[in-house]
Image (cartoon, grey):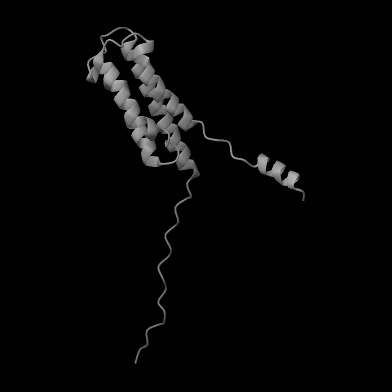
Amino acid sequence: MTIHSFARRRARTRAVPDPLPALAAAVVTASVAAPWALGFAGSHAAIAGSIAFAMTFGPIALLVTAVPAAAATTGVAGAWLAASPWALGYAGRGLAAWPADLALGLALMAIARAALRGRAGTEAPARAPSSPAAPASPSRTR
């Protein structure tokens, strides 16, 4: 076997990277850019909320497929993002204010659900309980 054939064989067996962490990071990045891109940057609550959201949940979203707790947290973060225009009071700042955060929040929840479902399909099955042990020796009668 030559070194070239080993390199070719190794290149064929590389795993395809999971797109969910990159997709989650893109959604978090879009949530930061949304106030400026969609014209509701006049709301201080929208600006502060989007920056705090990205700083808090951006790193966690990158772990969405690696750690089940990160996937669950990302789902909760998506629910917060979807509700934040009403909770922080900037839903009335224009037509684009609440649909953007609602859509991005729903996308994060879908990514988290896909990560949790994908993880459930790859985990090892649970072991069946073992049968009770038989007595070591029969009892003697006198």
Is 136 located above or below residue 4 in the figure? below
Q: Quadrant of residue 30?
A: top left
Q: Is residue 124 left or right of residue 139?
A: right
Answer yes or no: is residue 73 visible: yes
Give the residue at x 39% y 11%.
37
Q: Position of residue 113 (x, y in %)?
A: 41, 32
Q: Quadrant of residue 107?
A: top left
Q: Is residue 16 left or right of residue 128?
A: right
Give the residue at x 34% y 92%.
142
Q: Quadrant of residue 140?
A: bottom left
Tell me how many marks there are: 0
Q: Position of residue 133 (x, y in %)?
A: 41, 71
Q: Is residue 14 left or right of residue 78?
A: right
Q: Residue furthest front?
A: 3
Q: Position of residue 62 (x, y in %)?
A: 43, 34
Q: Position of residue 116 (x, y in %)?
A: 42, 37
Give the residue at x 43% y 29%.
111
Q: Is residue 110 left or right of residue 89?
A: right
Answer yes or no: is residue 78 visible: no
